[in-house]
Image: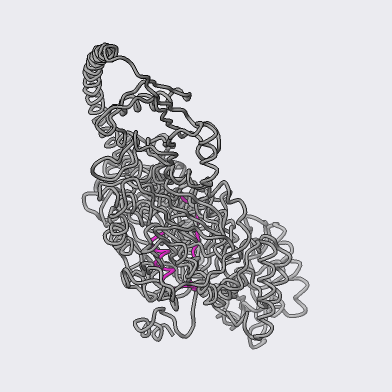
């Protein structure tokens, strides 16, 4: 079976053709070894699954993980080698300083870019596992710090795999489980010891024995599916009936697998009873799988070609409106804002960017508003962008305020709610692929309507405009970037906008208008004219905004204002006729600052080669909503009375003198102001340079600290893993040490270990009978101690052994008369290096006694006289050669006999009495009696008897020496 799978691996996307088996990726960091051990202690050996263990390891330390986990499971545990074919009922552990990927069921090792520092081996493997195994993939997040694995599990879930997370309460370090749970995508949240049971049930139901759960009966299935749509709509107010059927089926089937439900009607019943399951299914159907800069090449094309062409003809500070429907947790919307910011910097231009990001999922919108993402986004965002657009907060990155202010996030139902309009760009990536053709046919014309002429439509790489190709033209065919076609009558789309306005949109989607022109245009023109006429008594006037741009004109103002030469401008100061500009600028500044009416009288301005005199009035508009905060400038002509020529000349002279005085005073004030301004500018410039220098130093220091923090965090995780492995090894050594101590003590052999200097290294309790040693004596020379042995110099013999490297053996006697076999041999390490001597003392006192007894028994056995031993019941237990010659019975025959077989009936009673006397311990003389030989011939014998004593039970047998008496 394995060979077949391996042979087909190169021809298919997945390694297993005939029978699938689940591949479980398990990620852990600090505290992960204990979690792995607890998991595999409860996992059966024949689960039918393969397990790949990914942990943060010290790149310089040999991992003990395979060896330690092997003790907890009967499955084979292997250290991953490059190119190994994955097999069921096997555990694969990542080696140090490597990344792991899987392709066609084959594990491949990759070198880490940074051996020390910030690496994401768990995320990387989970993403690879999702792409290679799809719904066959399972990921488990266990104890650890940081957020590694959170992005990878999104990929697993997006490919219909299963996600299991250790609950925070049971995790030794809850950073990784907490980050995984924050995604809202976990299918199971369990203590480690309960995970194997849940995993076995899921795998058997979903992968090993999947069956057909939803489509055996089409009519039955359709009815059940309609009921699910109704339950979702009634509980969430969202209609999924126009989504692609296959997408809905796969998601429903996945939820059925999680709960081990075989029949879709049973799942409908469960769904009707469980609000929580409705919410989870709703989240599953939204498919919120996204990341920063998804398809990086597409964003490069957008930045290098598409956006510059879109922005190049826009005036400075012009508004740019972008809509991102289906934004999920905001990664794509933030990616667009970053690209736009970089594009503006490259063009050296500034635009007012407004990005409207919407989604059906309010939880996702809230997450997007916070702009807080796990630190693992570094795998999708390059370090330069991380540094510029994000700030570090513990184990997360937060998008900087300047970028967040470009975006407005709001919940919106794309199908039911009105669209945004007058858009420069619309980015709807990887959403249409989940919608049915009917819904796509409705949305694409709406997108056309929402975009400005030549606006940009940005779709996912697997999406297209389908039958609406007459509405859009390709800007980049590979990455599905389209440009809106100019308006054509025959291409006018049929639109069907929703009637009801969306809920809770007033505040969240309140659009800040970029300029005052739009605000003024929001008021009906007749209402504005009426306001002006009521407030100004109908003289010529204009309304200006905070930039002094004219937004409305009333009456004939040609005598006071005229278009300026050059580029067209509606700024009132640029349009003011000679003589009016200084007074007008002063009045506008005062009115804007003081917020009350300012009047300047007797202003002479040039008009048609002469002068006219006017009175100028500037007053703020403090009412009327939309135009509140603007200024009204009113021009009053002054009617001059006729005077004599002399008076006119005199008045003219006085006016000239007055003007010259004012001019001189103005020049002096201006010069003083210029000098003060130059001084202030110099000081500000100097201060700014210092601040810039300080800021650069702080940035550099901050970068170094961030790098150091990442390296320390990585080192801490690696150290925690190494410490756990070493602690496990220490526990094993401690147990082995206890076993050895008990073993040595149980042998009743005294043992002393000496080092090369003959200092005491270790000893057993039995050794203290001969040499008075205590625990505090370890490390002292053995020559400092006397022994209980007669004429035996232990130190001298040990030195000789170290010199000759030969074992020596002696029999020595102790002062109390006991005998010991003493053996001295070299101490060899595992590397066969001599590192001291081992001395053993074996008590052979009893052995010598037994040997002496055996010698005596040997004499008795070969004696010519019959020697017989029998117990109290008369059973023969010893029969020597003399007895065999005397009676004819062999030893084997005799040992099965009782004394009754040797004694005639008439002698039996007297022999019993004799035997009783002997066993009682009384002395007896030679007993004369008859015996029967083997051939039943009587033999007259004289018996000398003695009782035999047992050390425990006393007298229990009798020995007799029997001699034949010749008559």
Q: Camera-side residue: 464 or 423?
A: 423
Across and down, in percent, residue 911 comes to 73, 71
Q: Camera-side residue: 909 or 109?
A: 109
Across and down, in percent, residue 350 comes to 31, 46
Residue 136 shown in magenta: yes
Across and down, in percent, residue 13 comes to 39, 79
Q: Quadrant of the C terminus?
A: bottom right
Residue at left 55%, top 80%?
885
Query: Which scheme is used to colour this image of the protein?
Result: one colour
Q: Quadrant of the N terminus?
A: bottom left
Residue at left 64%, top 88%?
935
Whether residue 230 is visible, yes or no, is yes
Q: Camera-side residue: 357 or 472?
A: 472
Report the side of 731 relative to 871 (left or right): left
Report the side of 165 relative to 950 (left or right): left
From this viewpoint, which residue is outermost toward the front?
644
Q: Main secondary structure of the magenta part?
A: helix
Residue 449 shown in magenta: no
Magenta residues span 123-144
Q: Give above or below for 758 relative to 672.
A: below
Residue at left 26%, top 24%?
684
Report the side of 264 relative to 706 (left or right): right
């Amino acid at each position: 079976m394995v060979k077949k799978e391996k042979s087909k691996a190169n021809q298919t996307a997945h390694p297993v053709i005939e029978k699938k088996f689940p591949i479980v990726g398990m990620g852990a960091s600090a505290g992960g070894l204990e979690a792995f051990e607890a998991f595999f202690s409860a996992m059966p050996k024949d689960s039918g699954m393969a397990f790949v263990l990914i942990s943060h390891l010290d790149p310089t330390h040999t991992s003990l993980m395979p060896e330690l986990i092997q003790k907890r499971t009967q499955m084979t545990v292997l250290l991953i080698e490059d190119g190994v074919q994955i097999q069921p009922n096997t555990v694969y552990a990542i080696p140090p300083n490597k990344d792991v990927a899987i392709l066609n069921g084959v594990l491949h090792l990759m070198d880490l870019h940074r051996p020390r520092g910030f690496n994401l081996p768990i995320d990387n493997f989970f993403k690879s596992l999702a792409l290679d195994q799809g719904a066959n993939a399972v990921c488990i997040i266990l104890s650890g710090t940081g957020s590694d694995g959170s992005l990878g599990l999104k990929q697993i879930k997006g490919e219909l795999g299963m996600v299991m997370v250790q609950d925070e309460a049971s995790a030794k370090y809850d950073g990784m489980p907490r980050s995984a749970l924050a995604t809202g995508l976990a299918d199971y949240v369990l203590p480690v010891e309960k995970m194997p049971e849940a995993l076995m049930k899921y795998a058997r139901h979903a992968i090993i024995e999947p069956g057909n759960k939803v489509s055996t009966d089409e009519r039955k299935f359709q009815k059940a599916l309609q009921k699910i749509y109704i339950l979702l709509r009634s509980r969430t107010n969202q209609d999924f009936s126009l989504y692609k059927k296959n997408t809905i089926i796969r998601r429903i089937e996945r939820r059925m697998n999680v709960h081990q439900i075989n029949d879709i009607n049973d799942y409908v019943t469960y769904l009707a009873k469980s609000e929580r399951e409705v919410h989870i299914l709703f989240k599953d159907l939204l498919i919120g799988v996204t990341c920063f800069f998804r398809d990086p090449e597409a964003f490069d094309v957008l930045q290098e070609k598409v956006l510059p062409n879109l922005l190049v003809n826009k005036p400075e500070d012009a508004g740019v409106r972008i809509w991102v429907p289906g934004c999920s947790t905001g990664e794509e919307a933030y990616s667009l804002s970053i690209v736009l910011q970089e594009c503006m910097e490259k063009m050296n231009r500034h635009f007012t960017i407004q990005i409207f990001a919407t989604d059906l999922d309010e939880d996702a919108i809230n997450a997007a508003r916070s702009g807080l993402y796990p630190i693992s986004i570094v795998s999708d965002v390059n370090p330069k962008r991380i540094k510029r657009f994000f700030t570090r907060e513990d184990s997360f990155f937060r998008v900087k305020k300047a970028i967040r202010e470009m975006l407005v996030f709001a919940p919106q139902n794309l199908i039911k709610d009105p669209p945004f309009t007058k858009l420069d760009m619309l980015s709807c990536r990887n959403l249409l692929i989940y919608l049915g053709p009917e819904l796509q046919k409705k949305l694409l014309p709406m997108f056309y309507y929402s975009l400005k002429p030549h606006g940009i439509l940005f779709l996912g790489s697997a999406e297209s405009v389908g039958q609406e190709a007459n509405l859009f033209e390709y800007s980049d065919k590979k990455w599905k970037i389209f440009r809106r076609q100019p308006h054509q009558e025959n291409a006018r789309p049929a639109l069907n906008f929703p009637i009801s306005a969306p809920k809770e949109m007033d505040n969240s989607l309140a659009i800040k208008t970029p300029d005052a022109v739009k605000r003024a245009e929001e008021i009906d023109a007749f209402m504005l004219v009426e306001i002006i006429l009521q407030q100004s008594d109908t003289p010529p006037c204009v309304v200006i905004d905070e930039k002094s741009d004219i937004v409305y004109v009333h009456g004939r103002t040609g005598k006071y204002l005229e278009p300026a030469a050059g580029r067209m401008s509606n700024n009132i100061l640029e349009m003011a006729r000679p003589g009016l500009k200084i007074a007008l600028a002063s009045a506008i500044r005062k009115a804007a600052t003081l917020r009350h009416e300012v009047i300047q009288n007797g202003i002479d301005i040039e008009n048609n080669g002469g002068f006219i005199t006017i009175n100028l009035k500037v007053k703020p508009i403090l009412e009327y909503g939309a135009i509140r905060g603007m200024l009204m400038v009113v021009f009053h002509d002054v009617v001059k009375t006729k005077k004599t020529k002399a008076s006119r000349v005199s008045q003219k002279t006085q006016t000239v003198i007055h003007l010259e005085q004012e001019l001189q005073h103005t020049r002096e004030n201006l010069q003083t102001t210029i000098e003060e301004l130059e001084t202030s500018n110099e000081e500000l410039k100097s201060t700014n340079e210092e601040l810039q220098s300080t800021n650069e130093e702080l940035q550099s220091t901050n970068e170094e600290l961030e790098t150091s923090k990442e390296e320390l965090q990585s080192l801490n995780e690696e150290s925690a893993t190494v410490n756990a492995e070493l602690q496990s090894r220490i526990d094993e050594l401690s147990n082995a040490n206890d076993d050895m101590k008990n073993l040595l003590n149980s042998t009743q052999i005294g043992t002393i270990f000496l080092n090369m200097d003959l200092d005491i290294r270790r000893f057993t309790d039995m050794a203290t009978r001969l040499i008075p040693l205590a625990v505090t004596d370890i490390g002292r020379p053995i020559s400092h101690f006397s022994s209980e042995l007669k004429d035996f110099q232990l130190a001298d013999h040990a030195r000789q052994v170290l010199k000759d490297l030969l074992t020596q053996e002696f029999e020595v006697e102790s002062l109390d008369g006991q005998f010991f076999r003493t053996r001295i041999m070299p101490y060899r390490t595992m590397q066969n290096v001599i590192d001291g001597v081992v001395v053993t003392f074996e008590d052979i006192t009893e052995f010598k006694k037994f040997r002496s007894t055996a010698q005596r028994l040997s004499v008795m056995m070969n004696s010519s006289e019959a020697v017989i031993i029998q117990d109290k019941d008369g059973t023969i237990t010893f029969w020597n050669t003399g007895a065999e010659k005397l009676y004819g019975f062999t030893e084997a025959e005799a040992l099965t006999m009782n004394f009754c077989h040797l004694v005639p009936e008439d002698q039996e009673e007297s022999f019993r009495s004799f035997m009783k006397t002997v066993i009682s311990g009384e002395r007896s003389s030679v007993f004369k009696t008859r015996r029967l030989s083997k051939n039943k011939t009587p033999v007259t014998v004289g018996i000398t008897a003695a009782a035999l004593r047992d050390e425990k039970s006393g007298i229990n047998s009798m020995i007799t020496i029997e001699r034949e008496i010749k008559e």
